């Protein structure tokens, strides 16, 4: 995870990374605080070919700005199980599979234009 965010370090004020290993299951977590005081928390879980993720970008009041995940709900979306939740009300919408680097690139673009 650390390698994925390194290219964006000029936008990141604080970063924390943790790895948990439980038998064949590996969980990586990160927390990034950006220069505008927004925050991104990420979770990636791998067990064999199975991969789950959640990346949640929040404002300084911990309200969701956007969350990307592949939890298998919303089967009506053409990107199932991939989707995102937008805004404080977390409205779900179809969205393609993303990586942590994709999400951090999006967040830093939003910071750069604001």
Image (cartoon, grey):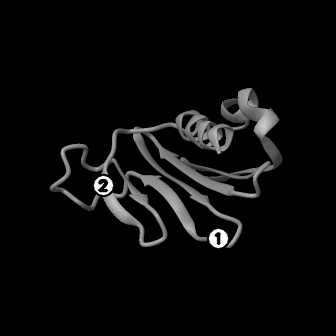
Q: Position of residue 21 (x, y in %)?
A: 65, 51
Work out whether residue 59 or residue 77 is closer to the camera in this orientation and state it: 59
**Seen in the image, is 71 located left or right of residue 60?**
left
Badge number at residue 14: none
**Seen in the image, is 96 located left or right of residue 29?**
left
Helix, strand or loop at mark 2:
strand
Query: Which corner quadrant of the image does residue 114 belong to?
Result: top right
Q: Where is residue 105 in the image (x, y as percent from the top left)?
A: 59, 34
Which residue has dot 1 on it? 62
Work out whether residue 13 or residue 16 is closer to the camera in this orientation and state it: 13
Work out whether residue 89 or residue 72 is closer to the camera in this orientation and state it: 89
Work out whether residue 51 or residue 21 is closer to the camera in this orientation and state it: 51
Image point (50%, 45%), residue name = 46
- Which comes sooner in the sequence, label 2 or label 1? 1
Image point (60%, 52%), residue name = 42
**Seen in the image, is 10 located left or right of residue 94?**
right
Looking at the image, residue 87 lies above or below residue 78: below
**Seen in the image, is 106 located left or right of residue 98?**
right
Q: Where is residue 50 in the image (x, y as percent from the top left)?
A: 40, 44
10 Å crowding of disc 1: few (<14), some (14-19), many (20+): few
Badge number at residue 93: 2
Helix, strand or loop at mark 1:
loop
Image point (33%, 44%), residue name = 95
The residue sitting at the front extreme is 114
């Amino acid at each position: 995870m650390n390698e994925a965010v390194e290219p964006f370090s000029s936008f990141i004020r604080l970063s924390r990374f943790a790895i948990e290993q439980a038998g064949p299951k590996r969980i990586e977590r990160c927390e990034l605080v950006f220069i505008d005081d927004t925050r991104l928390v990420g979770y990636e879980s791998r067990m064999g070919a199975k991969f789950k993720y959640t990346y949640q970008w929040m404002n300084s009041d911990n309200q969701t700005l956007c969350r990307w995940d592949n939890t298998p709900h919303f089967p009506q979306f053409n990107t199932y199980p991939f989707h995102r939740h937008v805004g404080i009300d977390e409205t779900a919408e179809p969205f393609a599979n993303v990586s942590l680097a994709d999400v951090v690139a999006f967040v830093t673009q939003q910071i750069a234009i604001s």
